Amino acid sequence: MRKALRWLLSLVVFIGTVSLTGATAGAATAAPAEPDIKDRLLAIPGMSLIEEKPYEGYRYFVLNYVQPIDHRHPSKGTFKQRLTVLHKDTNRPTVFSTSGYGLSTTPSRAEPTRIVDGNQVSTEYRFFKPSRPEPADWSKLDIWQAASDQHRIFEALKPLYDKKWLTTGASKGGMTATYFERFYPRDMDGVVAYVAPNDVNNKEDSAYDDFFKTVGTKECRTKLEAVQREALVRREPLSKKLAAYAEENKYTFKTIGTLDKAFEAVVLDLVWGFWQYQPAATACAKVPDAKTVTDQALFDYVENVGGWSSYTDQGLDPYTPYYYQAGTQLGAPTITQPWLGDLSRYGYQPPRNFVPRDIPMKFQKGAMKDVDRWVHKNAHQMLYVYGADDPWGAEPFRPAQGEKHDSYVFTAPNANHGAKVEGLVAADKAKATERILAWAGLSKSSAKAPYDAKLDRPAKQGELTLRP
């Protein structure tokens, strides 16, 4: 009995030893843990960290990436371009987003990012501060150079995020996504462009005039036109208010030339800014009566809809890169506004008036024609969303049609420059969502990320001038 007990104890010890040894050996041969995503990002040559901001469910990084000033001649200097990475999981799709302007460093999520529940890379457009070479060679600010910035960032990040990629943007960001696809059509697996203007012929803008003849109700259009006309009739008292406003805020008018030119530019933008940003369903009732409105109330209304600081030096300076591009490649709309009669002294002023004179500009009339032609013939997995009440949609992109092109244009009813897939009619919304998921390599039953009031808040509607 004692021998049997001794044998049993020996067996238990032996089994325990084998188990422990096996566990130790298994641990020794287990795959090493994946390096931290921050370490992997910073291991990319030219990438540096500005800051990491905590956000539940994500890692959020603000970064700098060294780019050539001229992608055709990389040896001729570099600059640092800001970008952000909203990291969820390297096993999820990635959305490449840009506004086409500066970069917000507050965590946010574009609609396609929420739909695919993925990662998001956002970039600052070249020459928007602080992503500007010093000194700035403005001839290197064009759509090909900017697309090449995106291409290099994609190539740098693709080894980390090796699932499907989509590119997106709204307004000038939608234009930017389109140009990226035109010049680097093999990079992205799909394009989702929102409210993207397509000014193919800069000298032919009748589509915008036609839009303003029919948008909204006749009653609303008539009230707006009367207010706009009254502002020009009262040019003298309102200009005095603008002068006092400018003095109080230390605003100047060197770039545009005179306070009078700035005054008229803001007034002539009024109808455009109204339909671009104001919710027509409620805003029409708030248009003042031109016959009875006081000078101060009229001044305040134009401020609310158009922004009196828009054409001051201080208001123009952050957007110099946009106006430069509008005057060299993108084009800029001109509307006639016949209801103003002879009250207008300058008409719609060209982008040249909004860029400092020491920056040379020459318009390249073939740039947009090339992009339009390419999209119309070669678009593949491209989706455009427009708002029915948005003036920028008067000249839309028209991608190639047919099953092999898998490209679409949808218009959201009663929507303005904030149009989204979410605002489409049910059938269009379902189709758009299904294609976005498919391009991201996901099934149509895939659940989108839960709504987050901070990440998914609407873009701030503060850009009240004639800018996409």
Image (spheres, rainbow, N blue to C red):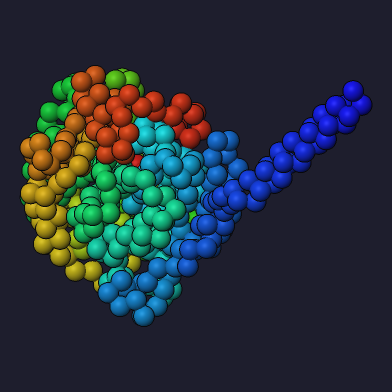
- Depth check: give the residue in front, 451 or 38: 38
- Depth check: give the residue in front, 176 or 467: 176
Residue 427 in the figure: left or right of residue 170 = left
Q: Where in the figure is residue 366, as x and y percent of width and height?
A: 11, 62
Residue at the right extreme? 2
Q: Where in the figure is residue 212, as x and y percent of width and height?
A: 15, 34
- Depth check: give the residue in front, 105 or 427: 427
In the image, residue 182 above or below residue 455: below
Q: Residue at x 25, y 23 (%)?
A: 430
Q: Residue at x 41, y 56 (%)?
A: 159
- Quadrant location of residue 58? top right
Q: Residue at x 29, y 20 (%)?
A: 281
In the image, residue 459 above or below residue 69: above
The answer, for residue 428, to whether it is visible in the render is: yes
Residue 49 in the figure: left or right of residue 217 = right
In the image, residue 450 above or below residue 235: above
How many numbered marks does the figure carry? 0
The answer, for residue 234, to whether it is visible in the render is: no
Q: Where in the figure is residue 309, as x and y percent of width and height?
A: 40, 48
Q: The N terminus lies in which quarter of the figure?
A: top right
Q: Residue at x 28, y 49 (%)?
A: 188
- Depth check: give the residue in front, 106 or 296: 106
Q: Where in the figure is residue 365, as x and y percent of width and height?
A: 12, 62
